[in-house]
Image (spheres, rainbow, N blue to C red):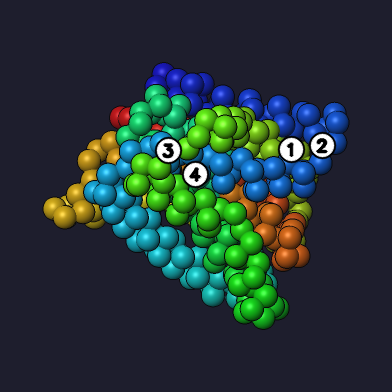
Amino acid sequence: MTIFLSILWNNVIPLSVMIALGITLHRVFSLDIKTLSKLNFYLFSPAVIFNLLYTTDITVSVLLKVLLFFFVFMLLLYGCVEVMIRLRGTPGGMRGAVRNSVLFYNSANYGIPLNQLAFASNPYTLSVQVLIMMMQSLIPNTYGIYNVNAHKLRAKDIRRTILGQPVIYAIPLGFLFHTLQVPIPQALSTPLGYLANAFIGTALITLGVQLGSIKLTFRHPKMKDVLLACGLRLIGGPLLALAVVWLMRTNGFTAVDALMAKALIVSSSVPTSLSSVLLAVEFDNEPEFASQVVLLSATLSIATVTAVIYFLRI
């Protein structure tokens, strides 16, 4: 119990405090979530992704293993979501909302600070989380946009929307500049550093502001779907990650060490990403359902994330 409380106090509560500050600020001042979202979406998020990929040494071995884990994990998670959707007979646009609420998890403004707290800012585990964040930033801006629009927009319009997302350019540029060791002039590197350093605090405050604008109601007509989505995200996610890591550890070519295994499992335990809400609002596809999942999963994650770290440590 002492270890559990220590993890809760040192790893999870600091994140909760920042989120609570965002909720409080929104309740007092009614902050504009759209402005904050645009700052995160078009400035801070691309900046931190580029900066982390540019400055973090990621070996080819780590890259291949993390990507293999991610693709197998996401495939299994997608399969679980599809089974749930089909068993419940989920209709039309609601299917896309359910998929996004489970498949898109908060690997950036929740996952990065959680990784730094749980692993004491270890550069090795950070590189693992950066790669997960990279993929989780790329997928909502490509597949996620397609997923919520496929039933109502033409392919050409969807493609134009996807190509307007800054993250899809920040990722290859970060890798390219790091690989070629392209020097960035101080006039650009200094503001880039400011933007990257502002990411965690601003993102957690933004998450709090978003949650502060959502009212959780257990009388919501789709509450059963909300609870199932939260269960798949917070419990199914870590269990599937554990299974994938176990399979990889028994195979010589893909074998992962214990530290990478723990980082991958922790990365899969975080709550639903705000991306699911932003996509739902932007494209008018079940925004109430998406908001309920984000709020409830963030609340329940205080207990579930603490439990995941606890079991990994013992």
Q: Upstream in the sequence, badge 1 or badge 3?
A: 3
For mark 3, give the secondary structure: loop
Q: Disc 3 marks which amino acid?
A: Pro
Residue wearing tag 2: 31
Q: Upstream in the sequence, badge 2 or badge 3?
A: 2
Q: Disc 2 marks which amino acid?
A: Leu
- Specify whether 22 is left or right of 311: right
Residue wearing tag 4: 50
Q: Residues within 10 Å of mark 1 (few under 14, many from 20)?
A: many
Nearer the viewer's eye, disc 1 or disc 3? 3
Image location of residue 204, percent across then percent down: 63, 34
Q: Residue furthest left?
A: 252
Q: Disc 4 marks which amino acid?
A: Phe
Q: Residues within 10 Å of mark 4 (few under 14, many from 20)?
A: many
Image quarter of the C terminus: top left
293 over 87 or under it: above or below:
above
Residue wearing tag 3: 183
- Specify whether 107 is left or right of 257: right
Image location of residue 77, percent across then percent down: 44, 61
Disc 2 to disc 3, C-alpha distance: 38 Å
Q: Residue at x 35, y 31 (%)?
A: 123
